[in-house]
Each structure stands twice: as C-alpha cells, then as structure tokens.
C-alpha cells in the first residue's frame, strides 16, 4: 500500500530536470499584457504553502516540490486504478507569487482510485502557452515520481479550459480524454468581447475614449461617468441606454438564454477592468483586439434601428496588428481549432 505521508521531492539536478515550472507576472493595468522589454519578473513559489494534508480515511501518497521556479502537487490513492487526472488552474492575475490548487474533484478522484496532479505554471497573467507546456511537463514528471499511468486525462477551468483545449491539440498523444470547464474556447474572441463591452458602454454613455487608454483616467474618470449615465444605481435601475448595453452584452456573449439577467448584474462591474488594457496579451508582438467589422445590435433583427446605427457610428474602432493574431501553435494567443482526436466534454453555465 501507499503510506499516508507527504513527500517533498529532492532538488538535486537530476530531479529538477524532470519537473514543471510555474511563475507569475506583474505590472500596471496598461502594461500588463505587453511583451517583456527587460529581464523577466522575479517569479517565486512560497514552498511553505506546497505541502497539503491527506484526507482522513483515504490513504494516499502525496508529493510536492519546485522545479525551475514552478510548484506542483501530486496525489496517488492507495488503490490506484492507473489513471491520472491533471488540473489546469484559471487566471491568477498579475502577481509574482505562483500558487498551486488541489484538484476541485480531489475527494471524488482519490476515493475512486484516480491520481491527480496540478502545476502552478511558470507564469501568471493570461499566458496559455506557459500553462500548456508546464502542465504537459508535469505529466512527464509523474512518470518518474510515481510510474507511467495507463491513461492521462486533462481538466481545467476558465483560462485553464483554454489551456486544456489547446494542450489536447498540441499534444494529441498525451491525453486520453479532456474536460474544459467554463473554458475560453473562442481564443481572441474573448478579448474582442471585453473590448466591445467597454467601448459600447462608453459610447452609449456619451463618454469619449482613446486607444490605447489612459488606465488612470479610465478607472477613476470614465467608468464612474459611464455607470452614472447608464443606471440609477449601477448595475441596477438601468435606463434605456443601460438596458441596451445589457441586451447587446447578452447577444454578443451567446444569445438570449436563461439567467443572463442575473449574469449581467454579477459581471457588469468586473468587465470594466478590461477597458484599461492596451489590447496586447503575453507573448503578443502587437494588438490582438479588433472591432472593425463588428455590427452592434440590441435585438435579433438584422436590420439596424436608428439607435443601433447611431451606436455603430459613434463607437471607437480599433484594428488588430497583423502580427498580433499571427497564431502558430503556441505563439501569441493559441487558437483552438476544435479538432481534438480524443473524447472531450465541455461544461458551461447558462448565464456566464
């Protein structure tokens, strides 16, 4: 059987050469997505946070450690069924500290004989390539720490869902099945949606915008003006212009569906933070957002009403840099082709 003690792996060079890496990224709102102009940030893992306790009544062997700046956790149940389930975490923000999650289905997995493993990645920020490579590296590390599994499954949420979808196309022979949860499966379309929301809100409110934005002006000046112009008590008490923003947001995020009213209230403020960004993402050599061909509407009638035409005439238009969307494998924002060679399930909420 497997002892119920945790193990921190040795940091000898031989061991380190096997492990996966995870790190963080910091910066101002304006520069957060820009490529590094100098030395990379000093990412770090707080090793005191890596050890994790076992679950009473479920005997497991647990491993944790750091390799090349990346933290990881591995757990193998006493009666291992030979399958390994990887976990790809979501967006961590722009901080320097790299952290590791336990798999959210940990109790179910170990109770049913599945091993699991999770990496912190080698960078924070929206760096899908780092998540794909570091998660794959951890599956390789597992072979040496435990043994080669019969099957490896990949799961991940939000940005981790993007990582999951890209990984199974980039490493088609590594995984037996996958499940992205609330995954960003539209790649650059997500950033277009963020840009649309902020530019449309500003246009409806009559608040002028510039690109790239002044983050301080956007957060401290523009956003408060937009809120007060669109609602009595944002995001409640929407006036007609605010209702048009809500309707447009619903249509551009998937269409009319249950729970979208509640989702708008939950996310309306959160989405404003993306209005302070400069349109680039990690590894991108240029702007990735583009709304030059966007047609903004408040309903499903393809004909533009006078109000819709006025909005389309007023909204700020920005074109992407050709090199910004020059996707090639893991370059820039990795594109999900939607052609996995393994069984894949996706899970999304209705309103989100």
Image (cartoon, rainbow, N blue to C red):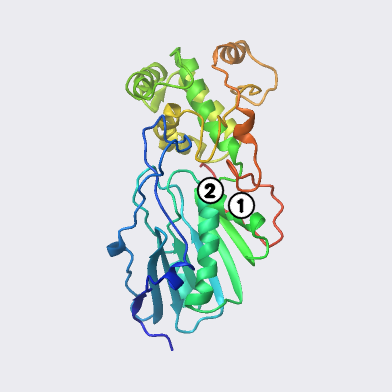
The residue shown at (57%, 55%) is 164
Instruction: Tell whether 99 sits left or right of 250.
Output: left
Q: Is mark 1 on a helix, strand or loop?
A: helix
Look at the image and tell me whether residue 243 can be seen. Answer: no
Q: Do the residues labelled 2 and 1 touch (CB within 8 Å)?
A: yes
Say whether disc 2 or disc 1 marks the residue closer to the N-terminus. 2
What whole-number distance in Å separates the C-alpha atoms at marks 2 and 1? 8 Å
| 327 horizontally vs 85: left or right | right
Instruction: Please name the residue shown 66% across and 23% down the image.
Output: 293
Residue 225 visible in the picture = yes
Whether residue 195 is situated above or below residue 149 in the rendered picture: above
Q: Mark 1 points at which residue?
A: 166
Residue 38: quadrant of the picture = top left
Percent position (x, y) of residue 83?
A: 56, 75
Residue at numbered disc 2? 128
Q: Nearer the viewer, residue 104 or 175?
A: 175
Disc 2 secondary structure class: helix
Query: Going by the picture, which residue comes out furthest to the left?
Result: 48
Residue found at the very far bottom of the displayed protein: 1
């Amino acid at each position: 059987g497997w002892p119920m003690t945790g193990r921190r792996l040795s940091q000898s060079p031989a061991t380190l050469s096997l492990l996966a890496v995870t790190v963080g990224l910091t910066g101002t709102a304006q520069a957060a997505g820009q490529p590094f102009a100098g030395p990379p940030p000093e990412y770090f893992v707080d090793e005191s946070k890596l050890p994790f306790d076992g679950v009473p009544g479920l005997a497991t062997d647990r491993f944790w450690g750091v390799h090349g700046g990346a933290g990881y956790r591995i757990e193998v149940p006493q009666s291992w069924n030979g399958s390994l389930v990887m976990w790809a975490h979501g967006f961590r923000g722009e901080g320097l500290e790299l952290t590791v999650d336990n798999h959210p289905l940990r109790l179910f997995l170990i109770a049913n004989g599945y091993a699991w493993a999770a990496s912190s990645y080698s960078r924070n920020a929206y760096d899908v390539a780092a998540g794909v490579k570091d998660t794959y590296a951890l599956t390789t590390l597992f072979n040496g720490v435990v043994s080669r599994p019969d099957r490896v499954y990949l799961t991940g949420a939000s940005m981790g869902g993007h990582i999951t979808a890209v990984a199974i196309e980039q490493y088609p022979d590594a995984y037996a099945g996958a499940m992205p949860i609330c995954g960003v499966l539209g790649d650059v379309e997500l950033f277009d949606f963020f840009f649309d929301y902020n530019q449309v809100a500003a246009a409806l409110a009559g608040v002028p915008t510039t690109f790239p934005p002044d983050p301080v002006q956007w957060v401290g000046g523009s956003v408060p003006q937009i809120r007060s112009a669109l609602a009595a008590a944002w995001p409640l008490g929407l006036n007609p212009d605010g209702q048009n923003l809500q309707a447009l947001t619903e249509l551009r995020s998937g269409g009319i569906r249950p729970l979208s009213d509640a989702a708008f209230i939950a996310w309306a403020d959160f989405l404003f933070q993306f209005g302070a960004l400069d349109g680039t993402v990690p590894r991108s050599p240029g702007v990735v957002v583009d709304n030059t061909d966007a047609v903004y509407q408040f309903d499903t009638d393809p004909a533009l009403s006078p109000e819709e035409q006025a909005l389309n005439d007023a909204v700020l238009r920005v074109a992407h840099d050709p090199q910004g969307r020059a996707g090639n494998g893991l370059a820039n924002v990795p594109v999900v082709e939607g052609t996995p060679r393994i069984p894949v399930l996706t899970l999304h909420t209705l309103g989100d």
